[in-house]
Amino acid sequence: MNAEFWIGFFNIIVLDLILSGDNAVVIGMAARSLPVEQRKKAIVIGTAAAIILRAALTAIAAYLLNIPFLMTVGGLLLLWIAVKLLIEEENDTNVSIGNNMRSAIKTIIIADVVMSLDNVLAVAGAAHGSIFLVLFGLGLSIPIIMWGSKLIASIMDKFPWIVYLGSAILGYTAGDLIMGDRLVANWIENDLIEKVIPFALAILVVVIGAIWRRKIQASQKTV
């Protein structure tokens, strides 16, 4: 219980609040259009998937850092998910509940893989080799993801415009993942660009998603 332990302890709390919040956002967004019972099931499955993935990835965290462009690929995938979640609400009227449920869970699990990678690498670094702190980080993320996703889904019911904020957060997270890739960072070697890109991608996701939504709405009106 030395100073390094307590520093790691508090760092993990902060990291979990920030990074598990991203998981909560994507689960809440993906589940928002489901009926209440289906939503509860999607949130539970999404949370369980996030925790299982984090536990599995923690065991191989050191190896993950050595895979070239892994975080970049994850970031690009998360960008697509951010846009997809923003536009899929317009397509929900033509999708059955069963298909909608499967689609939501599939989206949640794919996003969980990407964002769990980010969380695991951050927590593993903050733990400084302490198994207890790694397990503490995994345990703490459970209530954050579950309660956070329920809260976000219910808020989006009342304030639909918040979906744009959620997509912007995911876009920023994607940019942060890409800039966190050592090969990309070494290639860019510019602190200002590294700070600007996550914000630029957050804006880009919202703009593309908004344009796409309008096109879908226009096509539905003509049918």
Image (cartoon, rainbow, N blue to C red):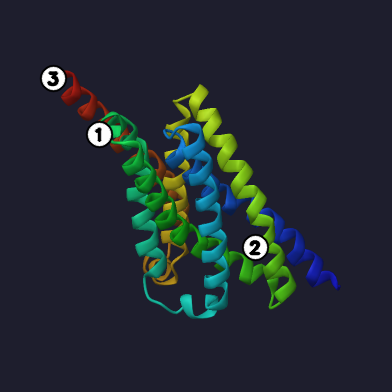
Q: Dot 1: what SS? A: helix
Residue extending farthest top: 221
**Which is nearer the N-term, disc 1 or disc 2?**
2
Residue under label 3: 222
How far apart marks 1 and 2 lie (CA) works out to: 37 Å
Under mark 2, the amino acid is: Leu
Q: Residues within 10 Å of mark 1 (few under 14, many from 20)?
A: some
The residue at the point 38 percent across, 67 percent down is 184
Dot in front, 1 or 2 = 2
Task: Check the image and report above or below for 214 versus 132.
Answer: above
Under mark 3, the amino acid is: Thr
**Which is nearer the N-term, disc 1 or disc 3?**
1
Under mark 1, the amino acid is: Trp
Residue under label 2: 138
Residue under label 1: 212
**Which is nearer the N-term, disc 3 or disc 2?**
2
